[in-house]
Structure formats: C-alpha cells, structure tokens
Amino acid sequence: MMVTDLVYHETFVKHVMSPGHPESPERLKSAMNSINGSGFLDDKLVNILTPKRAPLEELYLVHDKAYIEGIRIKSERGGGIYTGDTSVNAFTYEAALLAAGGGIEAVDRIMLEESENAFVLCRPPGHHAEYERAYGFCFINNVAVAAKHLLEKCDVERVMIVDYDAHHGNGTQRTFYSSKDVLYVGLHQDGRTLFPGSGFPNETGAGEGEGYTVNLAMYPGAGDSSYDQAFSRVIEPITRTFCPDFILVSVGYDGHFKDPLTQLGLTTSGFAKMNSRLKKMAAVYAEGRLVCFLEGGYDLDIVGMCSLNLVQELAGVDVTLFNDRYEESEIASEYTARLIEKIISDSPLL
Ligand SMILES: [Zn+2]
C-alpha cells in the first residue's frame, strides 16, 4: 500500500529568530501534537521521513553560492541578522538545508513510487527567499529547489506550483518568471495591504514564461467562497491546459480569519476543500504526484487543525471537521468576481 510521507526533523524546531517572533518553533510543535493526537498515524498510512541535507549544488540552481555560504558563516558564528524580522541562530543553516533536502527526498520517493504524496512540515519556510536574499522569515526557497530538482534531475517537463499562503510567494515567482516549464499560481492577500507588496494580477511572466505566472490577489476579508471561485474558474481550467507532471503546493494557514498577521477570511473547511481539489487535480493530471510545503500560519491552534486535516487528506482518510465559521463581505466577493474576469480575459492559457 502507498504511503504519505510526513517530512520532519527535530532541527526544524531549533531554528529560532527572536523571543516572541510569530514564526516560532511552537508552530511545528502544534502541528505534530495535533497529528499525533489524532491516532491515525497508527494505521501505517503515514511514514515519518527524517530528511538529509540538500546537496549544495542543488541549492545553487536557485540561490547564489556566496549567499548560501553567508548563511552558513552566520550560523557558525552563533547568529546574525538579515532584516529586522529575519535572522539566523546557530541551527538555521542546518535546518534550512534539511528543509530543502526534505523536499528533494519527498519528490524523489514519489517519482520512484515509494510514496504517494508528501507534506514537508518544515521550518524555516521558503517562498519569500530570493536568489541572494533572505526575506520574510525565509532563507532557502524549498519549493523552488524541489521544482528545479524535478526539472533537472527527474524525467519531468512541467511543474505546477500553487501557493495559497496569505502572502505572495515573491521568491518562487521570481525564480520561474521567464519559464514556461513551471506554472506559478499564487492566491494571496492583495499586495497593497500586505507584505511583501507584490503579486499583482498584471504580473503574468516574461518572455517565453508569459502567462505562466498567475496572481489571484484577494481583497482583505476574502474567504472560502472567493477561493472556491478561484479554483473553479481559474486554477482547475488552467491546470487542464498546462497538464502538469507534478504539483507542488506552498501551504500557508495565515489566510485563516483568526490569523494575527493578515486580513483574509478562510476557515479550516475552506483549507480542507482546497487540499481536496489539489489532490484531485494531481490525480487527474499528474498521476497523483503532490508535495505540500509548510510556509506560514501564525495562529497555533489553526496550524494544528489545518496540518492534521492536510495529512488526513493526503493519506486518504476522513478529514476531521472543525466548525469555525466566517462569512466573507460582499465587497470581497464582488472584488473577486471582477478579478477573476480580468485574469481570464488576460491569460493566454485560459
Ligand atoms: Zn504567509
């Protein structure tokens, strides 16, 4: 029987930026407690995969060598700062290499049919990290490293990355902006109202990558119904056109209405529905090949509930329902309807 890999390493919780920082080790502890507490791990449907470090040559496909060296040097010295909210301690370099390595191992095992799909439950996250810049709590772009690995080391031609973290995945978008081999689809809060201030609908790719970047920049307060529309009218149709060999997902639970850092309106069932649709898309177009990477999400209870639901979905068992509710505003719904029309009319793939 096929298993779901849950990629986890104890070093992921040793990376700490500053006391009280929202991107804290408690996030992973909450996720692991919730998953372990559910009891379904005993069913042997989930394999806990302890990753190895990513090979440096693979990181250099996405990042500048001197920049990666700089993270190592800062960690060896015991710590250092990149920006006010993004800093290194003695474990950061190791944790970042293990997180990226976990993504590589997860996709390799799926390609070898040793596992069916995976959730990389890692810290530090990666989607804001750029070629030579640590940014937004991120150092190495884990999802971009996995996508490059698939294209360069595996027999894969087209990779789709769906990023539903509340913040725009600027680093991932930039890595593949001129490529037609990677379709990047971001669903996030509009950059006029949230870090990192990018990911607008008119950012659609460049050169032969024109049309292969899609940004669904949501109005504050957009929730389950807006995301539902985005999947039905944009994401599922564009997946049919692109026909990916592999789907990677940047998972962020900071789109939940309780999240302290953002203003979106998703519920736990909204997240569960997105995961279910992504798994179906992978089954239809990509032989089920699906790896999810943890990015953000800062309400600890929500991180726990949504991580449990994601692993249940991947493993094909009943998803535990939580009864949180949020009604998105009419302004948000109307804004989403117009946004979707604009994206459909501008996209060469729709
Ligand atoms: Zn985020």
Image (spheres, grey):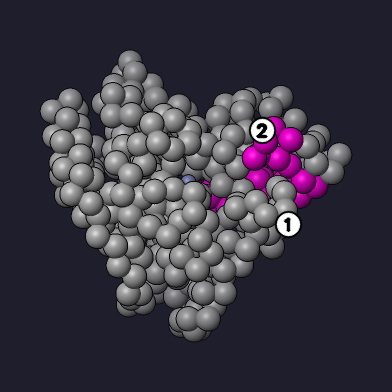
Residue 325 visible in rendering: yes
Q: Quadrant of the N terminus?
A: bottom left
Q: Quadrant of the C terminus?
A: top left
In the picture, measured across the screen, residue 273 lies left or right of residue 66, that is: left
Please name the residue shown 48% across and 81% down the image: 38
Crowding at mark 2 (Cα within 10 Å: few <14, some 14-19, many 20+):
few
For residue 187, the mark is: none
Whole-number angstrom distance, CA of label 2 to CA of label 1: 20 Å
For residue 83, the mark is: 2
Q: Which amino acid does label 2 sit on?
A: Thr
52 up-or-down from 49: above or below: above
Quarter of the rendering containing residue 60: top right
Question: Would residue 69 be counted in the magenta stretch?
Answer: no
Q: Which amino acid does label 1 sit on?
A: Lys
In the picture, measured across the screen, residue 215 lies left or right of residue 140, that is: left
Question: Would residue 102 be counted in the magenta stretch?
Answer: yes
Where in the figure is residue 258, as x and y percent of width and height? 42, 60
Q: Which mark sits nearer the N-terminus, 2 or 1?
A: 1
Crowding at mark 1 (Cα within 10 Å: few <14, some 14-19, many 20+):
some
117 up-or-down from 178: above or below: below
Q: Mark 1 — residue?
A: 14
Where in the figure is residue 284, as x and y percent of width and height? 22, 54
In the picture, measured across the screen, residue 119 lies left or right of residue 263, that is: right
Please name the residue shown 25% across and 54% down the image: 328
Where in the figure is residue 84, as x and y percent of width and height? 67, 36
Q: What residue span does the magenta drawing correspond to? A: 81-107
Quick one: which residue is furthest to the right in this view? 77
* Tag 1 secondary structure: loop
Q: From the viewer's perspective, is the residue at label 2 or at label 1 nearer?
A: 2
